[in-house]
Image (cartoon, coloured by chain):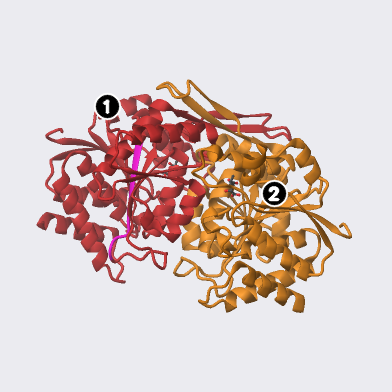
Chain colours: A red, B orange
Amino acid sequence: MPSQIKLAVIPGDGIGPEVVAEALKVLKATGVDVSTTEFPFGASHYLESGTILEDSDIDELATHDAILLGAVGGDPRDPRLTGGIIERGLLLKLRFALDHHVNLRPTTIFPGVTSPLANPGAVDFVVVREGTEGPYVGNGGRIRTGTPHEIATEVSINTAFGVERVVRFAFAHAMGRDRKKVTLVHKTNVLVHAGGLWQSTVDRVASEFPEVEVDYMHVDAATIFMVTKPSTFDVIVTDNLFGDIITDLAAAISGGIGLAASGNLNPSGAFPSMFEPVHGSAPDIAGKQLADPTAAILSIALLLSQFGESDAAARVSAAVEADLSARGTTARSTSEIGSAIADAVAQN
Amino acid sequence: MPSQIKLAVIPGDGIGPEVVAEALKVLKATGVDVSTTEFPFGASHYLESGTILEDSDIDELATHDAILLGAVGGDPRDPRLTGGIIERGLLLKLRFALDHHVNLRPTTIFPGVTSPLANPGAVDFVVVREGTEGPYVGNGGRIRTGTPHEIATEVSINTAFGVERVVRFAFAHAMGRDRKKVTLVHKTNVLVHAGGLWQSTVDRVASEFPEVEVDYMHVDAATIFMVTKPSTFDVIVTDNLFGDIITDLAAAISGGIGLAASGNLNPSGAFPSMFEPVHGSAPDIAGKQLADPTAAILSIALLLSQFGESDAAARVSAAVEADLSARGTTARSTSEIGSAIADAVAQN
Ligand SMILES: CC(C)[C@H](C(=O)O)[C@@H](O)C(=O)O
Ligand SMILES: CC(C)[C@H](C(=O)O)[C@@H](O)C(=O)O
């Protein structure tokens, strides 16, 4: 663990800078020794400079211990930003270049938070989403584009190396939890090639973790359980695309993406991990102090845990929990919420 | 339209025969002229005979006007049935061989039905799922299987021909509905090749349907709206895999897969369409008269609509709706529910 955490900060677009400011306020309140360097990347930077993220930018980011990212993405109707070029050129590029093979997304329904589910029960699970392969590799193409004979393909690439390391992480992670249960979510009855690799990897790794209960669920069935019995889940391990889909659903049932934190982890430490709220840049409410900084603040708790600062991480989580359960109907600004949580952290 | 509908019936496994018996009871009660031929296909048939579905079986099924399928699939722990061989060898084989390119899955929250959502609002949408391409084509493979150097791929294949016909169906279908809105659900910011084909096809077809409102949503965001604001949707058009995932979620929010009907349509009429409840064979409750036949009965309503029997279809739907809203807490057997609905249909 570094004595001082060198943090690269990418506030990004839209509400990104607002929520990042509050996250940093809370991080400071923990007293943990952190130095920050800000980077301008995002849609605005691209529109001004013409570049999204150069190789040299990645090299520079890689000299840091961790990255905090707010949100990136401009006006979806801007023709210069179509086709997900910022998402792919920045967010996914970083996940791949920095080998963020574990995308960790915890889901808890905190006391005081309203779920859209009538009876959610006690929800506390974490999705371990693979982050560097699957249908996200960009492999595939289009031929005879725009003609009646066009064919477009997408190739999901899955490797024993890539699947095993994330499955192994999931089992190790489960060992640190009360229920010690791992559920593989996939679609092995249809995607037999990738499904076969995932299932056999889980079977093999499972034999090394006899204390962990192992379960399997098709991704379609998992969406049903997510709304009818989300307390079923403890640790879910799944591929990049299924993980993308079910973590948005998980965020929705636990009170919205305004509360969902994530860590794009490189557990080996070869490259810095990146922490980000699951929500996007929400250009429509940007600059108005209307955004909820809670997801960004909870991402700080994940960052602190990653650096072994479990005491500070617990203080941040506890302050968020207390704040959430005391939230009434009075609207507070982004910075009011951040300051309230930071004050609570400082006092504990 | 045939003067008599020649219906092939595949009761299948588990609860399949029980729900099919009730669906046929209701079909008979409509007075529509139907002749039925039963086929034994399913997991039990496979375990007894060693064959799942021969080419000659498909030829014979193809001589019928339509197919009613209960549910197929045996005990998931039976080693002879792993890897989805029944699902792929029977269900998917039929969808592909009979060119069921439109998989139509309506979602309504009927009065009296309890949704797991606290405030679902007025939900009435239909998912038009592509049924013959995408990641379901089975393309891909494994090399160096079982070694640390294994690579497994899945290739999603999308053609202008295949995408356009299902998109066109969705727009035409929307024209017959009040809100006339089509939402493309995909992941165009990541799956740029397939996403590009889908989006450009929707754009082009949309220009021929100026009265239809067009919308786009990423599949991850769609799962959020499905639980926070499902009344947003009218007609969703999407690929085979995304359609599989979101229709299970749609079934869950509207009271469960016990109520979800589907039609695997070949709108050209070149091959018979196939109607089936979305639920599986549920071996754990099979033979106990515990299954809800409603989804199978609603699949009959879809079948009748397909044959222009809109009056009979409406009578079936109305009887189901009345039955659902009168359902108290008293448990009824599968056949009690079927008889009650059949009686109501006969009397109207
Ligand atoms: C913005 C997009 C590329 C990204 C993803 O698909 O991974 C987002 O949805 C997420 O879940 O972090
Ligand atoms: C059983 C399975 C192959 C099938 C599918 O994936 O299409 C089912 O989930 C469905 O939705 O009809």
Q: Quadrant of residue B162?
A: top right
| Residue count near mark 2 (Cα–Cα under 10 Å), binned few <14, some 14–19, many ≥20 | many
Relative placement, left or right, of B164 versus A10 is right
Magenta stretch: includes residue A103: yes
x, y percent for residue A119: 39, 67
Residue beneath the point at 48% across and 37% down? A85
Residue beneath the point at 53% across and 49% down? B245
Q: Quadrant of residue B51?
A: top right
The residue labelled by disc 1 is A270
Relative placement, left or right, of A296 versus B35 is left
x, y percent for residue A304: 20, 43
Against A132, is B296 above or below? below
Residue A135 seen in this snapshot = yes
Q: Quadrant of residue B133?
A: top right
Relative placement, left or right, of B167 versus A313 is right
Magenta stretch: includes residue A59: no
Give the prevailing secondary structure in the magenta stretch: strand
Chain ID for label 2?
A: B
Against B158, is B268 above or below? below
Chain ID for label 1?
A: A
Inspect the image, locate mark 1, and give the three-letter code of the amino acid beneath it.
Ala
x, y percent for residue B204: 69, 45
**CA separation in Å, label 1 and label 2:** 48 Å
Q: Quadrant of the N terminus of chain B?
A: bottom right
Camera-side residue: A25 or A263?
Answer: A263
- Disc nearest the viewer among 1 and 2: 2
The residue labelled by disc 2 is B102
Please state the extent of the stretch shown in magenta in the rendering: A102-111
Camera-side residue: B146 or A278?
Answer: B146
Q: Secondary structure at mark 2?
A: strand
Inspect the image, locate mark 2, and give the three-letter code of the amino acid beneath it.
Val
